[in-house]
Structures are given as C-alpha cells and as structure tokens.
Image (spheres, rainbow, N blue to C red):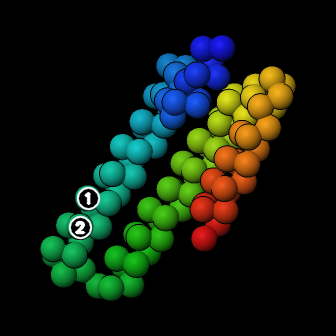
C-alpha cells in the first residue's frame, strides 16, 4: 500500500541509482542552458545558439524518456497488477501532454 500511496500523492521514492542519474542529466541540461545564456550575452551568431537550443531540447526529451520508462516499469505496472485502472487514464493524459 505504501508504494501506491507514493504515486497517488504525487511523490515517488527512487533508488539511489535512479536519483543520481536523473540529477546528473538535469545538471548537464542546466549547464547547457547557462551556456546558451552566455552565448546570447556575448552576441553569438544566431545559428550557433539555435544549434545549442536544439541540443538542450534533445537532452530534455531523453530525460523524459528515462523518467517515463521508470514510471511505467514501477508505478504503472504495479497499479495495473493491483487493478487500479485509473493509472492508465493518467498515463494517457500524460502522454498526450508530452506529444503536444
């Protein structure tokens, strides 16, 4: 019941490995965004900035894929096994928002 409570109350206890991976990814993305800001401040050439923005978008998409995969393998799979079908509806809504 504790795991279900975690997901329903919008929190998730992650393994140390998963936590470190997600934080490392976000730290790299944060560094990339700071680099883009510095490029703008230094009047960098627009196409160079756009390429870096594209790299950040790709990194964020990769982050989403990892996080979504972890969510499906843990919360969603467990809830389906426990007969909690509303989790499927939540997943569908989340996927629709991600595909905008």
| Residues packed near mark 2 inside 10 Å, few (<14), some (14 to 19) or many (20 plus) | some
Instruction: Please report the residue visible at 76 percent of the width from the left and 25 percent of the height from the top.
Output: 78
Are circles 2 and 1 on residues that touch, CB within 8 Å? yes
Q: Gap between marks 2 and 1, in whole Å?
A: 5 Å
Q: Position of residue 39 (x, y in %)?
A: 24, 72
Q: Is residue 64 above or below residue 56?
A: above
Q: Residue furthest left?
A: 41
Please give left or right for residue 45 compared with residue 80 in the image: left
Instruction: Please report the residue visible at 58 percent of the width from the left and 31 percent of the height from the top.
Output: 8
Q: Is residue 98 above or below residue 1?
A: below
Q: Quadrant of the N terminus?
A: top right
Would residue 17 be visible to someone looking at this image? Answer: no
Q: Quadrant of residue 85?
A: top right
User: What residue did someone put label 2 on?
Assistant: 37
Mark 2: secondary structure:
helix
Mark 1: secondary structure:
helix
Report the front residue among 69 and 96. Answer: 96
Report the front residue among 31 and 83. Answer: 83
Q: Position of residue 32 (x, y in %)?
A: 35, 57
Q: What label does residue 80 carry, if any?
A: none
Q: Quadrant of the C terminus?
A: bottom right
User: What residue did someone put label 1 on?
Assistant: 34
Q: Quadrant of residue 42?
A: bottom left
Q: Is residue 6 above or below residue 90?
A: above
Q: Position of residue 94 (x, y in %)?
A: 63, 53
Q: Position of residue 19 (x, y in %)?
A: 48, 28
């Amino acid at each position: 019941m504790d795991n279900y409570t975690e997901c329903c109350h919008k929190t998730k206890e992650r393994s140390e490995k998963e936590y470190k991976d997600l934080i490392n990814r976000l730290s790299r993305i944060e560094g990339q965004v700071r680099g883009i800001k510095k490029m703008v401040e230094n009047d960098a050439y627009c196409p160079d900035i756009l390429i870096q923005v594209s790299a950040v978008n790709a990194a964020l998409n990769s982050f989403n894929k990892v996080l979504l995969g972890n969510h499906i393998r843990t919360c969603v799979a467990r809830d389906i096994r426990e007969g909690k079908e509303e989790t499927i509806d939540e997943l569908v809504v989340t996927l629709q928002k991600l595909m905008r």
